[in-house]
Structure formats: structure tokens, C-alpha cells
């Protein structure tokens, strides 16, 4: 049995049909930065919007090397997929600052017409840049609260609808610890409200909630709702250069457009019967499955999300 098969059986609980098993020690496996549409005149400009998306940093393969311990490596090798931000952030209630988020996307499609369930799994680690000692109280050089949020999800379209689904870990809001899971679920509203008051934005209500949707200082986001009982303290070690690999899984029923369950570490959250945000279908993307990973900083400091490996499966 190949080592990849042993690792798959030991680290993951995939559904019957594995669409992709991405080991980033072997390459990008089709993952790349999520970019805007460079299709406008006069010189391949982007559509008008209040969310500048051309400053998201590129994804990279990383050895997870730090100033004190040197190279950490990945969970099962040397390289992991690394998402990063630039050292810039707006207050939570404002649109994301240019460069304050990092995104990765992989573009797939359905192949089993009888399948009902779709599942995403990964092993991840996260940390902030160890740049300056600027905190208050004990461990002023620990920057856990610089990480605003990170998540996994998908933009998916069947023969009738396009739908957005996913989960994020809301870690900190304007420096205040939150430490809870939320699932994608768009609060009803207008296209203008969704686009931060922009008339004529190409993005419609419910689309791309990782960067669109009203935000409020208390942590409210028009694109998310709290997972019931979803408070969870993840592992964040006593210094930013000590990372721990943690398991994450999300399963949906795409035939009925409902969540089924999510899991982080050994904690499972029952989401059965929870509807998925559904919007009008988009032309020429029937059968689309586009898994997405994202990350956002809460301060003017770079933050990082590492993905050891990622599995997409259905049955």
C-alpha cells in the first residue's frame, strides 16, 4: 500500500467517491489565488466595487520556517499550502482592506449524477507573524488576536441553482476574542446592502460572502450565522512559531441544499436541516464545485494559514 493511501485512511474519513486528495508536499494540485474578473475596458480592468480584490497575496508552497526554531515543515512532509495576508486591516464593520484577506480556490465539477452528499476535509494550522512585541499584559509578543477569521467552503452549482456553503472560525473582532464557528447563511437583503452600499456592483446578494455582506462591531456578519454550541478554543501555542495541525470537516446534502455536520478536532456539530444559501444560477457553470479556503487579519500584521492536505469527496 502506498504511503498516500495509508495517510488517507489514517487521517481522513472521506465519502465513497474521492474527487481529489491534495497532498501539498507534492505540489499545488490546482489550487491558486482567488482573483477578480479582469474583463473590463479599456485595459482588462475589474468591475466597479468597494472591495479591492487585486491585492490578495498569492498562495504558495511553504516549509513553515520561523525566526527562532527554523523550519517546521508540514504534518506529513516538508511543504504545506500557505495562505497569507498583507499587514493591513480595516475595522471589522468596514469592507475588507485591500490585501487584508488571503484566498485559495480549486476548480472542479460533478461527475456522479446519483451522489447526494459532498464533503470537504483538511488538516490546518494558523499563526500570526512574529514581528514586534506590542501587546498588553502577559506574553505581549503573542499575537493570537491578530487573526480575525479563516474558513473553508465552496461555490457550487447544480442544474437549477447556485449555492454557497462553508464554515469559518471567527477568532477575533477588533482585538476582542470570539473563538467560535459560524456557517455560511446569508441574511435576506438587497444587492446594494450586500455590496456595502455600492450601486451596480457585479456581485449579487448571497454571492462571495467571504468578502461581501454587512458587518457590525459585535461580530455580526450578514453572510454567516453561529453554529449552535459552536464556541471552541482551538490550539494556539505559547509562541507564534509553534503550530499544531488540527482536523476540519464539513458535509452537506447538495440534493436538498442543506448542511449535515461539521467537525473540528474531535468535536462534531450537528447541522442537519440547516438550509444553504441559494442564489440564481450563473450561466455556463452547471456542475461547478469550487472549494475555497480563506483567511483574514484583524490588525496591521500579516497572518498565515497552512493546509497540510485537503480532501473533496461525495457519495
Image (cartoon, rainbow, N blue to C red):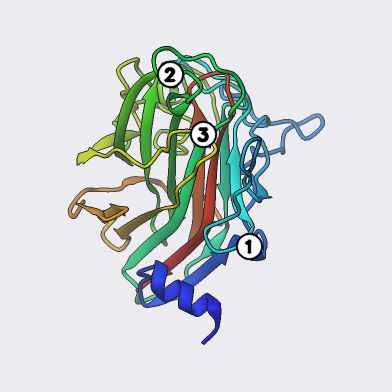
Measure the C-alpha gap from mark 1 to mark 3: 22 Å
Tell me if I can see residue 281 in this picture.
Answer: no
The foreground one among 265 and 194 is: 265
Name the residue carrying label 1.
25
Measure the C-alpha gap from mark 2 to mark 1: 34 Å
Q: Residue at x 42, y 24 (%)?
A: 145
The foreground one among 101 and 160 is: 101
From the viewer's perspective, tell me whether residue 180 is left or right of residue 142: left
Q: Residues within 10 Å of mark 3 (few under 14, many from 20)?
A: some
Q: Are marks 2 and 1 in contact (CB under 8 Å)?
A: no
Q: Residue at x 35, y 72 (%)?
A: 15
Tell which residue pokes out farthest to the bottom in this image: 1
Tell me if I can see residue 263 in this picture.
Answer: yes
Q: Which label's residue is closer to the chain start, 2 or 1?
A: 1
The foreground one among 168 and 129 is: 129
Name the residue carrying label 2.
92
Q: Residues within 10 Å of mark 2 (few under 14, many from 20)?
A: many
- Above/below status of 129 relative to 1: above
**Foreground disc of the pair 1, 3:** 3
- Above/below status of 189 relative to 255: above
Tell which residue pokes out farthest to the right in this image: 43
Horizontal and vertical percent position of residue 214: 38, 22
* Mark number, residue 240: 3
SS of the residue under disc 3: loop
What number of labels is visible? 3
From the viewer's perspective, tell me whether residue 167 is left or right of residue 303: left
Q: Residue at x 39, y 67 (%)?
A: 12
Amino acid at each position: 500500500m502506498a504511503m498516500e493511501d495509508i495517510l488517507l485512511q489514517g487521517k481522513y474519513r472521506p465519502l465513497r467517491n474521492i474527487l481529489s486528495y491534495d497532498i501539498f508536499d507534492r505540489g499545488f494540485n490546482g489550487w491558486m489565488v482567488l482573483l477578480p474578473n479582469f474583463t473590463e475596458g479599456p485595459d482588462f480592468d475589474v468591475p466597479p466595487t468597494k472591495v479591492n480584490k487585486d491585492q490578495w497575496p498569492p498562495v504558495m508552497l511553504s516549509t513553515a520556517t520561523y525566526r527562532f526554531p527554523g523550519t517546521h515543515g508540514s504534518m506529513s512532509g516538508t511543504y504545506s499550502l500557505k495562505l497569507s495576508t498583507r499587514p493591513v486591516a480595516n475595522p471589522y464593520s468596514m469592507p475588507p482592506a485591500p490585501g487584508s484577506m488571503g484566498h485559495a480556490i480549486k476548480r472542479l465539477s460533478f461527475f456522479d449524477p446519483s451522489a447526494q452528499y459532498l464533503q470537504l476535509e483538511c488538516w490546518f494550522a494558523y499563526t500570526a507573524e512574529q514581528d514586534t512585541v506590542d501587546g498588553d499584559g502577559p506574553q505581549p509578543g503573542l499575537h493570537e488576536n491578530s487573526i480575525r477569521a479563516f474558513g473553508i467552503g465552496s461555490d457550487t452549482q447544480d442544474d437549477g441553482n447556485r449555492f454557497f456553503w462553508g464554515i469559518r472560525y471567527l477568532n477575533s473582532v477588533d482585538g476582542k476574542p470570539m473563538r467560535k464557528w459560524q456557517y455560511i447563511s446569508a441574511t435576506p437583503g438587497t444587492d446594494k446592502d450586500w455590496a456595502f452600499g455600492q450601486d451596480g456592483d457585479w456581485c449579487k446578494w448571497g454571492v462571495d460572502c467571504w468578502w461581501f455582506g454587512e458587518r457590525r462591531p459585535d461580530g455580526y456578519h450578514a453572510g454567516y450565522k453561529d453554529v449552535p454550541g459552536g464556541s471552541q478554543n482551538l490550539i494556539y501555542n505559547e509562541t507564534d512559531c509553534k503550530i499544531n495541525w488540527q482536523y476540519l470537516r464539513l458535509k452537506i446534502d447538495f440534493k436538498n441544499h442543506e448542511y449535515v455536520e461539521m467537525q473540528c478536532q474531535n468535536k462534531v456539530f450537528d447541522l442537519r436541516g440547516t438550509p444553504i444559501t441559494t442564489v440564481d444560477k450563473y450561466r455556463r457553470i452547471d456542475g461547478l464545485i469550487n472549494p475555497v479556503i480563506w483567511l483574514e487579519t484583524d490588525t496591521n500584521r500579516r497572518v498565515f494559514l497552512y493546509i497540510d492536505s485537503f480532501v473533496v469527496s461525495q457519495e
